[in-house]
Image: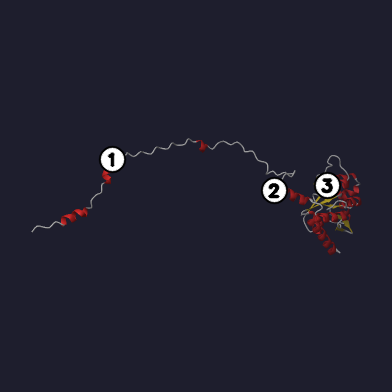
Amino acid sequence: MKIKRQKHAKKTISFYKYNFCFREPFQILIDGTFCQAALKNKIQIKEQMPKYLMGEVQLCTTNCALKELETLAKDLYGAKLILQRFQIRKCKHTKDPVPASECLLSMLEETNPHHYFIATQDQELTKALKKIPGVPLIYIILNTMVLDKLSERTLKHAEAVQLGEIVNSSQQKSIQGLKEKEGLGKDGEEKRGKKRKRKSSNPNPLSCLKKKKKKPMPQQPKKTDGEKKKRNRKRRPAGGEKAAVGSNPTTA
């Protein structure tokens, strides 16, 4: 029986992970009725809950649940001591406390965006929880903790998301992130199309320097007509004079 319960819990948790983006540590919202049942059946919530859910958990409650136990009979004093050990999540009823069932429902809102598990023995609260998609329900039966089967509302919601009829919270975040990367605002207008005004900046100090004046090239003196004529004269080859001297006959 224990192996079957473990397989059922593993299958159900994987469904919530895939379809509703549940991640560890799992947040378990607990009320006084669950603590009272655990006390009667000698169940150690802190030890057995992580083993049953096969992962890390954060056990938490609300101020309304604690104050509800304070106003009830002294028989629930032990349940109150257990509930006080858990983390307290802020609710909307700090000034005017409400019954625990009403407080837990307000924490879930319409789609359980914070991915809470609910641990309770309250039958009326259980009926209301099954109308909200994506809410895992834990209760105690026959001295054991049991993760309830998937509700019809949860199954229909998951099917609608797969068909694209509904966009869940994780998909909305990813779409919003893509819009920001592409430069699209909330109204669908492109931010890139808007021209940004350039800020008036000081001129470059190097551009303000005075340009250096170019030095005039030195003019070469004009050549006179006499120099031109001297350069134009062709020099006779030196070998020609020797040849002329060698051609005269020598005297005997």
In front of the other: 219 or 139 = 219
| Amino acid residing under circle 3 | Met
Residue 96 relative to residue 231: left or right? right
| Residue drawn at the location 82% of the way across and 62% of the way down | 7
Residue 204 relative to residue 116: left or right? left
Answer with mark 2 or mark 1, whichever residue precedes in sequence: 2
* Residue 236, x across and y down, in percent: 23, 51
Residue under numbered circle 2: 182
Q: For the residues carrying marks 3 and 2, which lies nearer the camera in this image?
A: 2
In front of the other: 167 or 112 = 167
| Amino acid residing under circle 2 | Glu
Q: For the residues carrying marks 1 and 3, which lies nearer the camera in this image?
A: 1
> Which image quarter is the N terminus in?
bottom right
Q: Do the residues under discs 3 and 2 have CB atoms within 8 angstroms?
A: no
Picture layout, residue 244 above or below residue 73: below
Instruction: Find the distance from the CA under tag 3 to the CA under tag 2.
Output: 34 Å
Residue under numbered circle 1: 225
| Residue drawn at the location 83% of the way across and 56% of the way down | 159
| Amino acid residing under circle 1 | Asp
> Which image quarter is the C terminus in?
bottom left
In front of the other: 22 or 131 = 131
